[in-house]
Image (cartoon, rainbow, N blue to C red):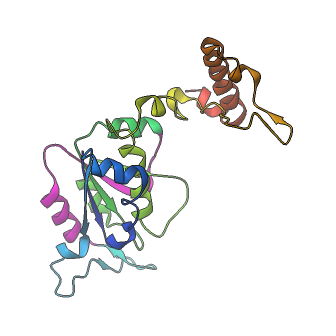
Amino acid sequence: MKIDVLTLFPDMYQGFLTESIMKRAIDKKAVTIEFHNIRSYSKDPHHKVDDSPYGGGHGMVLMCQPIFDAIEDLRTKESKVIMLTPDGVPYNQEIVYDLSHEKHLILLCGHYEGFDERIRSIVDMEISIGDYVLTGGEVPSMVLMDSIIRLLPGVIEEESHINDSFHEHLLDYPTYTKPQNFRGMEVPAVLCNGNHQEIMAYREEMRYNRTKERRPDLLEK
């Protein structure tokens, strides 16, 4: 997979891709990631990328020209262009799985008071990572990359993400490690009896019970 990120603050990604699973995925060449400063596409002598909104109002709005030129420069027939915006579709694990099968993602990070509305005409999808507002799209783009890249072949063991929370619209089952007794809190006996069928049945039951208790809305799906 190839990922291109359009951002005004490429330095925000320092460290994100040089640790843990993200670094492993890059080292294994499961993904290549490039960052592009939107200002480098501006035709303004001072590399201006924003201006005041028509009709008045607070803040500045990202202009069409640099973003249109950037997307048109990077886009291919295999590209999917995603705008990170609070009014996009809510991000969930189903979307993660779908995007993990794409060959080329272009992630568009907003800032300031948002995008000129006409920029929506050049993107394929708008995504929100939650019902709150951040200072820009850089953090949401990291959320997308982290959630998608871990699903790419060879990055982590397939069994690890098959049992993830939200797989089949259920939360994950509870897990334990040594010691078996910690401050009077015991590991459930079924997990220590070596009977794999009973363990699997217990875990499926716990997935359902935990979802029913904490996220009953998921069961409706």
Task: Find out whether residue 78 is within the magenta segment.
Answer: yes
The answer to whether 183 appears left or right of 193 in the picture is: right
Which residue appears at 53% of the width and 52% of the height? Answer: 130
Above or below, 20 against 46 in this view is above
Q: Position of residue 162 (x, y in %)?
A: 47, 29
Residue 14 position in % (x across, y down)? 37, 68
Residue at the location (53% across, 34% down)?
166
The quarter of the rendered structure image containing the C terminus is: top right
Relative to 116, is 220 above or below? above
Assess whether residue 200 is covered by the magenta stretch: no
Q: Is residue 150 above or below residue 211?
A: below
Q: For this view, does 80 lie left or right of residue 86? A: left
Q: Is residue 9 visible?
A: no
As drawn, is 86 to the left or to the right of 185?
left
Say which of 46 and 182 sits in front. 182
Q: Quadrant of residue 34?
A: bottom left
Location of the N terminus by quadrant is top left
Residue 1 against residue 163 in the figure, above or below: below
**Residue at the image point whose x is 15% and y is 79% from the top:** 43
Q: Specify start and end residues of the magenta stretch as a single range.
A: 63-92
Which residue, as the protein is rendered here, is positioned at the far front? 179
Q: Position of residue 71 (x, y in %)?
A: 19, 59
